Image (cartoon, rainbow, N blue to C red):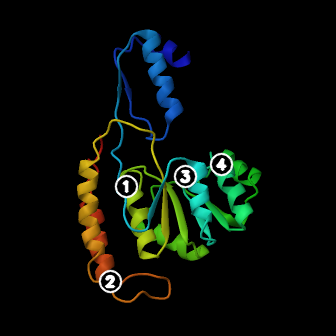
Amino acid sequence: PALAELIRSRQVRVLVDVSHPYALALRAAAQAAARATGVPCRTFLRAPACVPGAGICLAADHARAAELACALGSPVLLTVGSGQVAVYAREAARKQVALIARVLPREESLAACRAAGLPRERIVTGRGPFDLEANRALIRRFGVGVLVTKDSGVAGGFPAKLAAARLEACLLVVVGRAPAAVDESRAAALWAEAGEAWEAPRGDRGEHGGSSAEAEAAYRAALHACPASVLA
């Protein structure tokens, strides 16, 4: 109702939805307001950046992602926001797995983590997207073996998470998007190229699981080649 009133009061002619790929409630509200006012609604989604491959597990929802993440018994880094943290906390407690959550520096985010039973030392706050080194540092800090993320596209920092997980020998669990009519071909082509860079000479893994300097340089080059224009 509030959005519909805004459309009417401002005499909006076209409603453009560029919300986050996982903001389903907001998208539904925009479409409902457009229908109620007879205004056309145009939705633009970031193209997905995740292409299934080695070290990546795809999950249809958060419940399944929690099961996959906690199955290995190693510390889990949660980077999907605070909205579903309780789902992961329950599974982590059941499997006796350490859960670390990186959330926005907001009181409601901290409150959700506390309510889920996370100790303060396992709650990390910050505003992304985070670069490769920031992700790697967090993985090393907690000895993380599994990283859980959404496929928020290139602009949302997904490539840096994927690169960090691979360089630190972590499993990456990706919560899938709701079905949407977006063309994945461009993202697939970019990550095929990045995959070739990853398969370049890697050398022996060091103490923290990092690859050789050559492999890291190749991966950085592949990340840099992903343009910000990979948006639907």
124 shown above or below 167:
above
Residues at marks 3 and 2, CA–CA distance in whole angstroms: 30 Å
Crowd rating for badge 2 (residues with CA inside 10 Å; few <14, some 14–19, many 20+): some
Residues at marks 4 and 2, CA–CA distance in whole angstroms: 38 Å
Labels 3 & 4 near each other (Cβ < 8 A): no
Residues at marks 3 and 1, CA–CA distance in whole angstroms: 15 Å
Crowd rating for badge 3 (residues with CA inside 10 Å; few <14, some 14–19, many 20+): many
Q: Is residue 104 visible?
A: no
Q: Secondary structure at mark 1?
A: loop
Q: Which residue is mark 1?
A: 50
Question: Residue 154: x, y in percent?
Answer: 35, 53
Between discs 4 and 2, the one toward the N terminus: 4
Residues at marks 1 and 2, CA–CA distance in whole angstroms: 22 Å
The residue nearer to you, when weighing 114 against 169, is: 169
Q: Quadrant of the N terminus?
A: top right
Q: Secondary structure at mark 4?
A: helix
Give the foreground label among 1 and 4. Answer: 1
Labels 3 & 1 near each other (Cβ < 8 A): no
Taking the spot 50% from the left edge, 37% from the top edge, the residue there is 23
Q: Which residue is mark 4?
A: 109
Residue type at numbered disc 4? Ser
Taking the spot 49% from the left edge, 14% from the top edge, the residue there is 4
